[in-house]
Amino acid sequence: MSEASSPAELEKPLVASVNERQVFPSMVSTELTLCDKSWWYPKNSDSTPRNKKPLTKLALRKNLDISKRLARKIAALKTYTPEQQIEENQFGVSTVLKLYENPFTITKKLTDSDLGHLCRLLLKTKSVKDHVLPFLSIDIVNQIESNSGATVTVWDQDTRSDHKLVLKKWSTCRSYVLIDKWRQDFVLRRGLEEGDEIGLYWDIYYSRFVFSVFNRVRGN
């Protein structure tokens, strides 16, 4: 009959230690670890370049153009026939998957009158009433409808700069216009020409217009 085990032997764990997998490399370990020496780590603990130069305005504009093109391609992945669209309209539902929705609710190709001595950008009445006025206070709307107009901020998304313009209703043609520094801050500063396509929308979070140039007739 074998001798009784000593107290030291009884205290030994019944489960093999993790180090034994070095002896048995084919065994799989279920040990939970937060660090493994076999993993690769960067030599420098700070992986963020300290001397990273900020993007230039040209690089920012190129990145924005690329993002817009990709978004338009993704949004156009699913197309509908006229019959399918009519069928869905009858039930008041849509199964179109929209991964991107263009926020620029006001778009326009600039005309000679938008760039000339009148110094104003003419906006369609329906676009302003549908996409701008509902998000403004009654006092601001009353100012816009008056002869003086209301001062609004316009954020140039392409150049990342703020500008102050005046939005008012032009009684002679029953349309809305952006005036004051439109020619100085946008036409001349951005080098806008007849035929250039621009976009605007009202940012409800910052209470301002957002402006961008979509396409230029000269392609620059």
Image: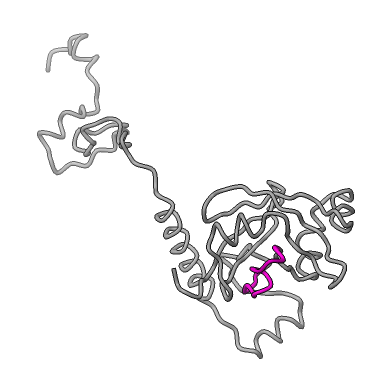
Rendered view: 142 above or below 124: above
Label total for image: 0
Q: Residue furthest front?
A: 117
**Above or below — where is 145 with respect to 112?**
above
Q: Quadrant of residue 121?
A: bottom right
Q: Residue 191: x and y, percent? A: 53, 63
Image quadrant of residue 157? bottom right
Question: Is residue 111 shown in magenta?
Answer: yes
Residue 10, image quadrant: top left
Which residue: 61% across, 54% down?
185
Residue 76 location, x and y as percent?
Answer: 53, 75
Magenta-span inclusion, residue 7: no
Percent across and percent down for residue 206 are 68, 46
Q: Which residues are magenta?
A: 107-119
Residue 109 appears left or right of 204: left
Q: Residue furthest top?
A: 7
Query: Which residue occupies 88% across, 59% down?
Result: 145
Residue sitting at 59 percent across and 68 percent down?
Answer: 98
Relative to 81, does residue 190 appear above or below in the rendering?
above
Q: Quadrant of the N terminus?
A: top left
Q: Is 39 displayed left or right of 49 in the figure?
A: left
Residue in the foreground of this view, choosing between 169 and 30: 169
> Nearest the camera: 131 or 155?
155
| Side of 147 where 79 appears, left or right | left
